[in-house]
Image (spheres, rainbow, N blue to C red):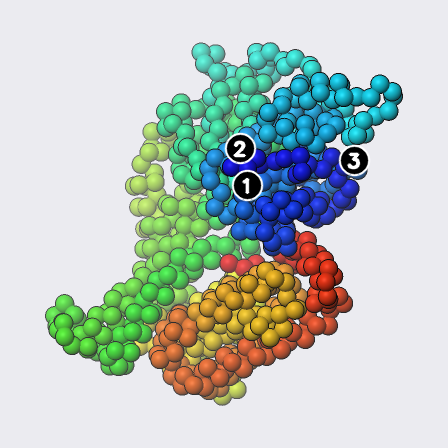
Amino acid sequence: MSEMITADLVDLDLSADTKEAAAHALAERMAALGRVTDLAGFLADVATREAQMPTGLDGGIGIPHCRSAHVTEPTLAFGRSAAGIDFGAADGPADLVFLIAAPAGADDAHLTILSALARQLMNAEFTAALRSVADTATAAALIRGEVTPQEAAAAQTEAAPPSGEAASGSAQTSPADDAAPAEAGTPDAARAPSEAPAPKDTTDPATADPTPEHPFRIVAVTSCPTGIAHTYMAAESLENAGREAGVELVVETQGSAGFTRLDPALIAAADGVILAHDVPVRDKDRFAGKPTVDVGVKAGINRPGELITEVRQKAARGETTAPAAAGTPVERTGEPGEGYGTKLRKWLMSGVSYMVPFVAAGGLLIAIGFALGGYKVNKAPSVMDHFVWTQTDSWAALMFQIGGVAFAFLVPVLAGYIAYGIADRPGLVPGFVGGSIALTINAGFLGGLAAGLISGAVVTAIQRVRIPQALRGIMPVVVIPLISSAVVGFLMFVVIGKPIATAQKGMTDWLSGLSGANAVLLGALLGLMMCFDLGGPVNKVAYTFATAGIAVSDPSDSAMKIMAAVMAAGMVPPLAMALATTVRGRLFTETERENGKAAWVLGASFISEGAIPFAAADPLRVIPSAMVGGALTGALSMAFGATLRAPHGGVFVVPLIGNPFLYLIAVAAGVCASTALVVVLKSLRGSAPGAPGGEREKDEHEQAARAGSADREQPVAA
């Protein structure tokens, strides 16, 4: 195994003035050593990670990092900037920049080394030594752990010139001066390295442990999207602050190298819990019933002392966390301060995402049944009563009836997992019950949506009621399911069920009556929606609208036309990008041309997400082009009267499509229109990427550097 960092990967005079330029300069050193195979592709991955959350930390540290298929082995590059580079930290620019590159399948040993570095960054002596080190070899050895901060300082003193001239790199802040300007997330960061740490028993009297027989005990979990740096830095920061505060604090790091669960005995004995995370905490229910502070991972790095104080205050007030009160599955993956509209969209998408596999499995099985046995297969007797192994009709009836059972789960699953998104697992029972009632009263998908939202609201209201400690154990398994199911059932059967069923019937009748120009306009609208965000919420609304129409034993002709138009339009974006990279490859980067090869298969399989890499890199040209082609295809499909009973499958279910030849013509027309438009738009931009020699490579690098901002411009995609 090669050394993760060498002197060739260290730049003590980093001249970059932006985070993109800094990443580019350090990544070039990795590429020169053969550790990065595609510089533009790797920088695009770095920019994508940066767009998720800024990688700047208080204390003048920037840690851009990512996992990438373009990295051959885990590698670390270090740069020191005299002017400072803005990485989004609250306290200002970073002068210490670490670029961490991990392969897509990095092994645990390498990731453990990277986690050790992340913990070292919380050590004020370590960062001070990096700011004062004079040569690249010593800096690399210091980062590898082969040289201590004291040894590095001694080596610099020995190498210092006798005159008053400063050695190379001495323009950086001295160790003593460094620690004061910014906190590194621990109390030690505010002291010079030579200053002795304060005794452990100097705790704040206001937060002193009210139970003197043992120290206050805290368990914590840290995690971040990549699981390489912030996860371990937050753990180190919390542990340091715990020692300073005189509390027992044990951290579970849920990083890329996996995680070892905290001993259940430790959790049971803990007086409080700190969750510092940007991705959902695995097995979060372990911590239910404890005073809990739930924050982002950066709070664990930057203000660990405040978090410890907060959890102790909650324990003193007797504030404990009920099984879903610390955040629902949707809230755990959201951003702080999200509005109600954003949360509502996520709750609905939670239900749709769990419903789609039932749609695909059930719909395809039903379609196979029709293909084998004809459209009268829905009149076949139960295969329990009549099944002949050698008869095709028996197998057709079997496929149809299994698919029908799968389809019967659609509305209950939709309602159940909307409630799950709102209230976590306690919402499942009333959600499924309400969804089943919606089917019983013919309220359909509208009833399922209402049942899910009501179930989540009812469970959340019950959880907010303060109850005695003795009853908390039976709440999730007896009280909440009983009361919430009764309330939801009453509302669905007696109050809102009939109006919703009436609205559902009215919408179905309206769709059945569409013809001529109205049908074509509806096809164009659905095509626009399918191509707007390529698998995102708007795309899913159109798809769910279509699948709702065929999720019955005998769908109308209009419903099957809508399904055909939606699937045809959804195939257009990836196929158009694949064709564009084939006919005018010079307009695209090497990475995009490789993505174009995969987009052929993804588009043919009705996976709209195959166009996301192109939309992320150039949303203002790709998305409008895709929408034009999708609208044309949807309109033509409706005009041609193509029908489809299967909810998925792409070209692989063409034999099940009504008017298949005209259907394929509609798809081809949309693909050609999108391809032509995206080629024209890309050809009109100011600097052609196809310029000869080094100009094209430079442009590709600039595109990769802009990927982060492009990600922010694109619509949300699933």
Residue at numbered disc 3: 82
Q: Residue at 45% of width from left, 47% of height from top?
A: 329
Q: Foreground mark, 2 or 3?
A: 2
Q: Secondary structure at mark 3?
A: strand
- Give residue 113's mark: 2
Q: Residue furthest right?
A: 164
Q: Residue 420 placed where, x, y %?
A: 41, 50
Q: Residue 638 placed where, x, y %?
A: 47, 83
Residue type (three-letter) at the residue carrying disc 3: Ala
Find residue 35 and report its image quarter. Answer: top right
Q: Residue at 74% of width from left, 46% of height from top?
A: 18
Q: Residue 4 placed where, x, y %?
A: 57, 36
Q: Residue 134 placed where, x, y %?
A: 75, 27
The crowding category of the residue bearing disc 3, from other C-alpha atoms within 10 Å (few below 14, some 14 to 19, many at least 20), is: some
Query: Which of the marked residues, 2 or 3, is nearer the chain's N terminus?
Result: 3
Q: Residue at 49% of width from left, 72% of height from top?
A: 571
Query: Which of the marked residues, 3 or 1, is nearer the chain's N terminus?
Result: 1
Residue at numbered disc 1: 74
Find residue 142 and report its image quarter. Answer: top right
Q: CA distance from mark 2 to mark 3?
A: 27 Å
Q: How many marks?
A: 3
Q: Is residue 369 visible?
A: yes
Q: Is residue 670 left or right of residue 181?
A: left
Tag 2 and tag 3, C-beta contact below 8 Å: no
The crowding category of the residue bearing disc 1, from other C-alpha atoms within 10 Å (few below 14, some 14 to 19, many at least 20), is: many
